[in-house]
Image: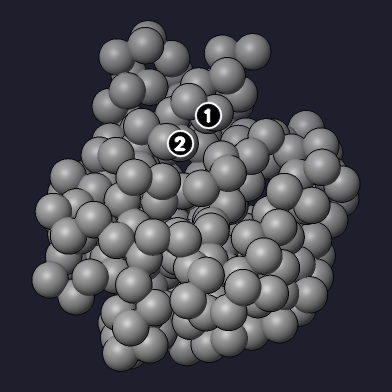
């Protein structure tokens, strides 16, 4: 997932990240385990996190995942936003794209997109991952032109092949530039490959790793919420 992350861990542990099939989730499969209640005229603005097990907080309690940590930071800043964690373990960018219809039925003012980790595990063509994310962005902008979109990037390890790593890592910056999106260049910066910040599987961040991820995301997200 990052340049420093062990390729062996990626290749030996696909089931951990790939535990769910692609497709539109029901409420039991979102990171919160709950469907999102309908908004109203007095409802607070919603920040929706769309992602994989990295967002869902695989192996942790819900309040240890980085969206929950960011919710506390948002509250501490006196901001009115409500956070919804729609992370789903095992999802690829194809699955995220397939969730577009479901997403359009949910209230959100800001959407944070984290997808591609499982594509990388499967050796998916970076062009296909890019196309899926672009289609998702297009769908959001067509249906919710007022919504803000934040993109979370990933860095592929060089051990997956230098050319593949360059192509995969670059797709996030390319998408951010093309669509003028705020970008977190490396979601797992300082976490990937650091044993003390990951679960024993070496792939999923532990509670301390999730705190570091929250730091990485907050640097960019805060500007979108206060601008």
Q: Is residue 156 above or below residue 61?
A: below
Q: Is residue 192 left or right of residue 145?
A: left
Residue at figure coordinates x 38%, y 87% from the top left: 11
Badge 2: residue crowd in 10 Å (few <14, some 14–19, many ≥20): many
Query: Considering depth in this image, is 153 or 28 the residue closer to the camera?
Result: 153
Q: Is residue 201 above or below residue 191?
A: below
Q: Is residue 32 above or below residue 148?
A: below
Badge 1: residue crowd in 10 Å (few <14, some 14–19, many ≥20): many
Q: Quadrant of the N terminus?
A: bottom left
- Image color mode: one colour
Residue at figure coordinates x 63%, y 60% from the top left: 169
Q: Is residue 206 left or right of residue 55?
A: left
Residue at figure coordinates x 45%, y 36% from the top left: 217
Q: Is residue 118 above or below residue 168?
A: below
Q: Which mark is residue 205?
A: none
Q: Is residue 11 left or right of residue 167?
A: left
- Whole-angstrom CA distance, mark 1 to mark 2, is 6 Å
Residue 85: x, y in percent? Answer: 40, 51
* Residue 95 in which image quadrant: bottom right
As helix, strand or loop, the secondary structure at mark 1 comes to helix
Residue 34: x, y in percent? Answer: 34, 59
Q: Quadrant of the C terminus?
A: top right
Query: Considering depth in this image, is 23 or 206 the residue closer to the camera?
Result: 206
Check whether the beta carbons of the residues at disc 1 and disc 2 lie within 8 A of each other: yes
Residue 170: x, y in percent? Answer: 71, 57
Q: Which mark is residue 217?
A: 2
Residue 90: x, y in percent? Answer: 42, 79
Residue closest to the far top: 78
As helix, strand or loop, the secondary structure at mark 2 comes to helix
Q: Let me know if residue 203 appears in the view.
A: yes
Tell me the residue that label 1 is attached to: 221
Q: Let me know if residue 87 appears in the view.
A: no
């Amino acid at each position: 997932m990052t340049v420093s992350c062990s390729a062996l861990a990626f290749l030996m542990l696909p089931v951990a990240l790939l535990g769910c099939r692609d497709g539109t989730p029901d409420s039991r499969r979102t990171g919160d385990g709950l469907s999102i209640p309908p908004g109203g005229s007095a409802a607070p603005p919603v920040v929706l996190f769309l992602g994989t097990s990295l967002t869902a907080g695989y192996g942790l309690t819900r309040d240890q995942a980085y969206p929950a940590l960011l919710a506390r930071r948002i509250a501490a800043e006196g901001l009115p936003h409500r956070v919804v964690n729609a992370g789903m373990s095992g999802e690829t960018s194809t699955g995220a794209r397939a969730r577009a219809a479901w997403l359009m039925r949910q209230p959100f003012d800001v959407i944070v997109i984290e997808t591609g980790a499982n594509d990388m595990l499967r050796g998916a063509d970076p062009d296909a991952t890019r196309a899926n994310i672009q289609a998702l962005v297009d769908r959001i902008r067509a249906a919710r032109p007022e919504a803000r979109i934040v993109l979370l990037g990933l860095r592929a390890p060089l051990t997956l092949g230098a050319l593949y790593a360059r192509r995969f890592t670059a797709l996030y910056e390319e998408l951010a530039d093309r669509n003028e999106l705020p970008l977190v260049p490396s979601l797992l910066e300082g976490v990937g490959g650091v044993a003390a910040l990951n679960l024993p599987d070496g792939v999923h961040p532990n509670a301390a790793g999730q705190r570091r991820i929250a730091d990485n995301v907050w640097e960019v997200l805060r500007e979108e919420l206060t601008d």
